[in-house]
Amino acid sequence: MADTIGGPRHEEFSTYVAARGPALLRMAQGITGNRSDAEDLLQAALIKTFFAWDRIANPKARDGYVRRAMVNTQISEWRRQRLTVHPTDDIPEQRVDDPTWKSDLADVVHRAVDRLPERQRTTVLLRYYEDLTEAQIADRMGVTIGTVKSTLSRAVAKLRLDADLTIERTTS
């Protein structure tokens, strides 16, 4: 029997999206390169996931399912766009933004985070990339919330003093 709107399946899915949405949106932004397209991509992937929700037996596999749906949807979009491009002898005048600053900044931040000690790096990744709460991080790492807070504070202080990030902030 089909589940009705507002049923347990809908509630479980809504809870999942509320909890994991920000992290999934960041992944979608990594795939698409901008927030607007990322929101569209994530929405399309979540619709596909909702229809397959009952078939995803393991709750730990949900993120993987959504990620795979995003990748497949984006690949399909690239293929559709490729079909709409037609070669011509005349090249139209276009203003082209240089998007390399985004990847340069991401690279600088990635290298700065990699230079952090392992515990600080793990804490930063769980907090700001996986979007976990301090309590969730403490539980996952087997430490107190106070330890998580102080570790994050020290890590952010180190990142603020990182020479590469300082140069990047002054040049952008």
Image (cartoon, helix red, strand yellow):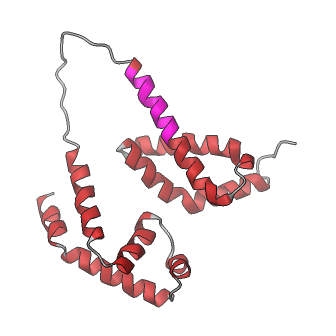
Front residue of 39/146: it is: 146
Identify which residue is drawn at 51% across, 42% down: 70
* Quadrant in the picture for residue 43: top right
Identify which residue is drawn at 31% across, 79% down: 117
Q: Main SS type for the magenta part?
A: helix
Identify which residue is drawn at 40% across, 18% down: 83
* Quadrant in the picture for residue 106: bottom left
Q: Which quadrant is the N terminus positioned in? A: top right
Please identify the residue farthest to the front as the structure is shown.
118
Count of numbered labels shown in the rendering: 0
- Whether residue 158 sits left or right of residue 31 in the image: it is left
Please identify the residue farthest to the right as the structure is shown.
1
Please identify the residue farthest to the top as the structure is shown.
89
* Quadrant in the picture for residue 158: bottom left
- Whether residue 88 sits left or right of residue 163 in the image: it is right
Task: Report x, y in % for residue 12.
Answer: 71, 58
Visible residue check, residue 161: yes
| Numbered range of the magenta stretch | 71-82
Visible residue check, residue 43: no
- Whether residue 14 sits left or right of residue 134 in the image: it is right
Task: Report x, y in % for residue 122.
Answer: 41, 74
Task: Report x, y in % for residue 104.
Answer: 21, 53
Identify which residue is drawn at 81% across, 46% down: 3
Front residue of 63/132: it is: 63
In magenta stretch: residue 65: no
Task: Report x, y in % for residue 37.
Answer: 42, 40
Q: Which quadrant is the C terminus positioned in? A: bottom left
